Image (tube, grey):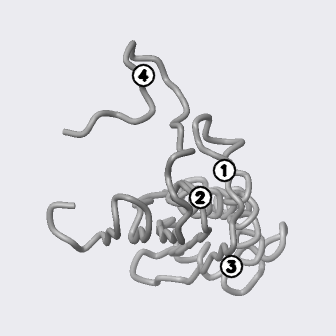
Amino acid sequence: MKDLTHVDAEGRARMVDVSAKPETARIAHAEGAIKMGADTLDAVERNALSKGDVIATARIAGIMAAKRTAELIPLCHPLSLTDVGVDIHADRALPGLRVNAWASTTSRTGVEMEALTAVTVALLTVYDMAKALDRGMEISSVHLTVKRGGQSGDWKRDQPGR
């Protein structure tokens, strides 16, 4: 097992020194879901909630959150992002919404946390905006799907053992 990079020799949390790493192109993708009642999903799709357009608001919230990840996650490095995006689509089989997000940069450290933060905040925004209709909504399955660039190389969720 690899040593934890955010812990020093005495076991104290620390920020990783990335100054010796080269700047490389980095990309990360993440996804998650929120289950809700079919009636709530219908209202979201019809844009019939009193708080406004749930999907547009959640998309913007996710993008804004990715840009502020270092303020939310204590040991994350602040990054200059070159691209952030959030896609949200209905999934009648849940029923609910699926959120996909991506982030990219050219930096000394990766953007996995930014992509994960974008997904999570987008999902929380959906919950906030639709909770008057359905307090039983369930956020689940937030996970990294793709990571490209950096010393550890590329990673994709469907690769066994990784």
Q: Residue at x 42, y 71 (%)?
A: 148
The residue that label 2 is drawn on is 114
**On the rendered image, what quadrant is the N terminus found in?**
top left
* Contact, mark 1 vs mark 2 (Cβ under 8 Å): yes
Q: Nearer the viewer, residue 2 or 89?
A: 2
The residue that label 1 is drawn on is 69
Amino acid type at circle 2 is: Glu
Q: Position of residue 88 (x, y in %)?
A: 59, 79
Q: Disc 3 vs disc 2: which is toward the camera?
A: 2
SS of the residue under disc 2: helix
Real-space CA distance between mark 1 and mark 2, rounded to the nearest whole angstrom = 6 Å
The residue that label 3 is drawn on is 43
Q: Nearer the viewer, residue 60 or 95?
A: 60
Real-space CA distance between mark 2 and mark 4, rounded to the nearest whole angstrom = 24 Å
Looking at marks 3 and 4 on the same chain, the residue that comes earlier in the sequence is marked by 4
* Contact, mark 3 vs mark 2 (Cβ under 8 Å): no
Looking at marks 1 and 2 on the same chain, the residue that comes earlier in the sequence is marked by 1
The residue that label 4 is drawn on is 8
Looking at marks 4 and 1 on the same chain, the residue that comes earlier in the sequence is marked by 4
Real-space CA distance between mark 4 and mark 1, rounded to the nearest whole angstrom = 23 Å
SS of the residue under disc 1: helix
Most extreme residue toward the top is 10
> Which of the 4 image quarters holds residue 93?
bottom left
Q: Nearer the viewer, residue 126 or 14?
A: 14
**On the rendered image, what quadrant is the C terminus found in?**
bottom left
Q: Residue at x 71, y 61 (%)?
A: 80
